[in-house]
Image (cartoon, helix red, strand yellow):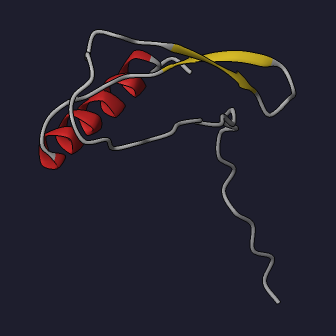
Amino acid sequence: MANHTEPLSPVNSQYTLGYGMRLDKGTAPELAHPQVSVTLPDGSEGHMTLHVINGTPDEIKARLLESVDAFFDINADL
């Protein structure tokens, strides 16, 4: 049997993305960004900012995808 080895790849840090979604009828102020407390997987406490997007479901989806792209652009050095 031939000795098969996989090429070595650089080791990447592992992360956890925490998020939640809720779609409500009506509108909420988009400029309000409340903070909620969260217990992180290691047991420590953290805070998460809640963002609000108003519009039709298609508009919300498009803006959400833009927001996710921007989040990863901002954190590109991770």
The N terminus is located in which quarter? bottom right
| Residue 75, percent from left and from top | 47, 19
Q: Residue at x 66, y 56 (%)?
A: 7
Residue found at x 28% / y 36%: 64
36 over 20 or under it: above or below: above
Label tally:
0
> Which quadrant of the figure contains the C terminus?
top right
Viewer-closest of 6 and 39: 39
Residue 24 in picture, x, y percent from top left: 31, 41
Q: Nearer the viewer, residue 35 or 8?
A: 35
Tell me if 42 is positioned left or right of 27 in this view.
right
Is 18 displayed left or right of 49 in the figure?
A: right
Residue at 47% from the left image edge and 13% from the top image edge: 34
* Vertical arrangement, residue 58 with respect to residue 11, above or below: below
Which image quarter: residue 46?
top right
Front residue (pair 4, 32): 32
Residue at x 43%, y 41% (from the top left corner):
21
Judged left or right of residue 72, residue 53 is: left
Q: Residue furthest bottom?
A: 1
Q: Quadrant of residue 60?
A: top left
Does 45 sit above or below residue 41? above
Q: Is 45 above or below relative to 3?
A: above
- Where is residue 65? Give x, y as percent: 27, 39
